[in-house]
Amino acid sequence: MKYSFTRKINLANIDRELWPYETEDISISDADSFEEAQQQVDKLVAERIGYYKAMSDTHKAKKADTPSGEISYTPAPESPAPSTSAPVAPAPAGPAPTAPPNTGGSQPPKEFQV
């Protein structure tokens, strides 16, 4: 028989500013005993809490380094400036279409006259 065990980490308990509402579920589903499953989950939880605490410490250090307590960011590189050469006009496709003969008059073409 395989045992499973799940634990939820509330990240707001680590740093409410960074993660006010986030949680993370950690589970094991293939342990041979309940105690083994609990030990494996406890180990994974300790690793994840350490990871999130390190992220929180890094965030707090960056925040302390910036003046006025604002989070600094690196602006995205600007797009290249447009070229200064004049735009090229499209080449004409050919002569302008002309109206078919005998369409401008008031009389219909010969084949339609009775």
Image (cartoon, rainbow, N blue to C red):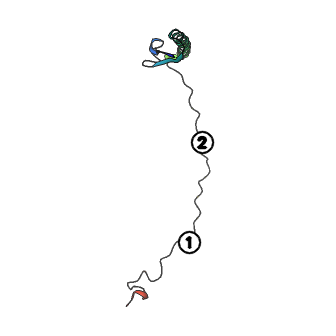
- Residue, x 45% and y 11% (percent of image)? 13
Q: Is residue 19 above or below residue 104?
A: above
Q: Label 2 sits on what residue type?
A: Ala
Residue placed farthest to the front in the image?
A: 1
- For marks 1 and 2, give the CA distance: 37 Å
Residue situated in front as seen by the camera: 53 or 80: 53
Image x and y of residue 41, in percent: 52, 13
Alpha-carbon neighbours of circle 2 within 10 Å: few (<14), some, or many (≥20)?
Answer: few
Nearer the N terminus, badge 1 or badge 2?
2
> What residue is pinned by disc 2?
81
Numbered disc in front, either 1 or 2: 1
- Residue, x 55% and y 12% (percent of image)? 40
Q: Label 1 sits on what residue type?
A: Pro
Which circle marks residue 95 in the picture?
Answer: 1
Mark 1 element type: loop
Image x and y of residue 98, in percent: 50, 75
Residue situated in front as seen by the camera: 103 or 6: 6
Which circle marks residue 68 in the picture?
Answer: none
Mark 2 element type: loop
Residue placed farthest to the bottom in the image?
A: 114
Q: How many marks?
A: 2
Image x and y of residue 3, in percent: 50, 15
Query: Would you say the residues marked 1 and 2 are in contact, meaning their CB atoms lie under 8 Å apart?
Result: no
